[in-house]
Amino acid sequence: MSDLSAAVSDSRNPMFTRHYADEYSAAVIALVWMFEIRQGTSEEFERFYGADGEWTALSRRSRSFLGSSFLKDIASETRYLLVEYWGEMVVYEKHVADFERPIELLQRERDRFVEKVDALGVFNALDTPARVGPTWSRRGG
């Protein structure tokens, strides 16, 4: 397993996530990653993780996925944050288990333009929009 895969795997490790599941099982959770990408790959990276990208499309297959915030550092053209919002930790863990192979394939594809990824943690989302109507993840149908 590459260092890149190992870093992402840490955030998807049941021991990592289960710690947070008990305390925040009813709360909206936010999983946060920081990426350093290779120079000249920003367009490809932004397409891959953007609202209509491959990574988000896979996450949308879970009803618990509420959407994401995708942020680019204004001081560094190669640093990004991705915040994924999930309705339930347990369902997130099931999503990761159910889609293990497609996630691995997407991670390999991502390796082409990402130099480093750090799982920053799982956070309790304190101020989130009301969950009425279509979820954020049901963009465009």
Image: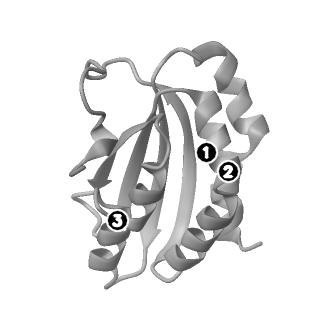
Percent position (x, y) of residue 114?
A: 48, 74
Q: Are marks 1 and 2 in contact (CB under 8 Å)?
A: yes
Percent position (x, y) of residue 7?
A: 66, 58
Q: Earlier in the sequence, mark 2 or mark 3?
A: 3
Q: CA distance from mark 1 to mark 2?
A: 5 Å
Q: Earlier in the sequence, mark 3 or mark 1?
A: 3
Q: Is residue 122 above or below residue 103?
A: above
Q: Which residue is mark 1?
A: 95
Q: Is residue 16 above or below residue 42?
A: above
Q: Residue at (44%, 61%) from the top-left corner?
A: 55
Q: Which residue is mark 3?
A: 53
User: Foreground: 133 or 11?
Assistant: 133
In the picture, the disc for residue 98 is 2
Nearest to the eye among marks 2 and 3: give it. 2
Percent position (x, y) of residue 24?
A: 58, 17
Q: Residue at (63%, 56%) from the top-left corner?
A: 99
Q: Amino acid at mark 1?
A: His
Q: Amino acid at mark 2?
A: Asp
Indicate the quadrant where residue 37 lies. Answer: bottom left
Q: Is residue 135 above or below residue 110?
A: above
Tag 3, which secondary structure? loop
Q: Residue at (26%, 20%) from the top-left corner?
A: 132
Q: CA distance from mark 3 to mark 1?
A: 18 Å
